[in-house]
Image: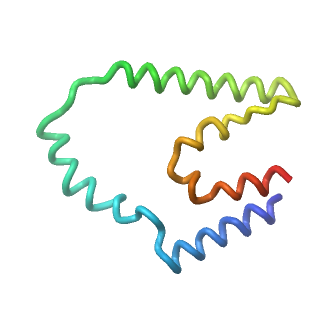
Amino acid sequence: MVVRIICCLCTLMHFSYQMGAPGVHYYGGVYFNKYLPCWLSYPETTDYSSIMAIGADGLFTIFLVVMQRRFVGWLFHPVGYVLPGSWIMNLVWSVFLHLQS
């Protein structure tokens, strides 16, 4: 399993350097040059419904962790709940297929 993880990370790094990592141009200048001045000049109010939703998701993830640790045959993994909503799942989903075997 360790060899598979190392191979997957090396492959991901190789293709990121060869073809360019997707979305890298968003990490730097766009947020600091375009959005940050707007956020500082016109602050928004606190969105309490979003905070409650994030808290409920965190509690559910903790529940999944506790159930997985307590019951050996528990099928639902916390990572399986957290990652599918992320854009990275579109790129590296095959890693999780290899880890199951």
Give the left or right position of residue 78, taking residue 89 as reference: right
Quarter of the view holding residue 50:
top left
Q: Residue furthest bottom?
A: 18
User: How is the rendered protein coloured?
Assistant: rainbow
Q: Residue furthest front?
A: 90
Quadrant placement of the N terminus: bottom right
What percent of the width, then of the height, locates residue 59?
Answer: 58, 22
What percent of the width, then of the height, locates residue 94?
Answer: 70, 58
Quarter of the view holding residue 67:
top right
Q: Residue at x 16, y 40 (%)?
A: 40
What percent of the width, then of the height, locates residue 19?
Answer: 50, 77
> Compared to 11, does 64 lie above or below?
above
Quarter of the view holding residue 75:
top right
Give the left or right position of residue 45, taking residue 51 as reference: left
Give the left or right position of residue 101, taking residue 96 as reference: right
Q: Residue at x 59, y 38 (%)?
A: 82
Q: Residue at x 72, y 36 (%)?
A: 77
Number of callouts: 0
> Compared to 17, does 87 lie above or below?
above
What percent of the width, then of the height, locates residue 69?
Answer: 80, 28
